[in-house]
Image (tube, rainbow, N blue to C red):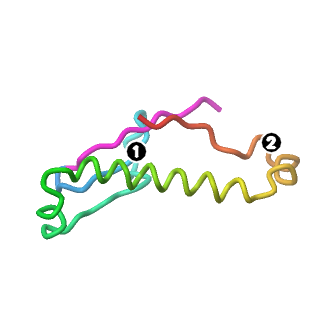
Amino acid sequence: MSPSFFEIVELPNGDYALRRVDDDAAPLVRISFSQEAKEMMADQDMSIAKAMIAAGIEATGTVSQAVDWDEEEDEFGDAQPHYTLH
């Protein structure tokens, strides 16, 4: 399986999304800020969306480390995902 590349984009409705670069399917993650939140962020909403997505990826890595991958590798091969975030 080749590595996937991801991008963070602003959608036409103002939401932010994490999606695969080579795939037009639904985004993996979507972040939506209320108008009140956008006003409080003072045009830093893209930076905050990036930080939120990075924190989610880090948390996913922490959770996946707790799984006994050795047991699952026998059944499914290399079970850990390979990805690069841009």
Which residue shows up at 26% across the image and 63% down it?
A: 32
Q: Give left or right: position of 13 versus 66.
A: left
Query: Do tag 2 and tag 1 residues touch (Cβ < 8 Å)?
Result: no
Quadrant location of the N terminus in the rendered image: top right
**Viewer-closest of 60 and 29:** 60
Mark 1 residue element: strand
State left or right for residue 40 relative to residue 16: left
Q: Any mark on residue 64, and which?
A: none
Residue with the mark numbered 1: 19
- From the viewer's perspective, is 7 left or right of 5? left
Q: Which three-letter amino acid code belongs to the residue tagged 1? A: Arg
Q: Quadrant of residue 62?
A: bottom right
For label 2, the residue is 77
Residue at (87, 54) in percent of width and height: 71
Image position of 12 with respect to 38: above or below: above
Asked whether residue 8 is drawn in magenta, I would say yes
The residue positioned 46% from the left and 37% from the top of the image is: 85
> Which circle's residue, 2 or 1, is located before the other in the chain?
1
Q: Which range is magenta?
A: 1-11
Q: Residue 78, image x and y in percent?
A: 76, 41
**In x, y percent, where is residue 47?**
28, 47
Outermost top residue: 2
The reply, left or right, for residue 19 in relation to residue 38 is right
Query: In 3D space, how far apart are the residues under numbered discs 2 and 1 (Cα atoms)?
Result: 25 Å
Point 55% across, 57% down: residue? 59
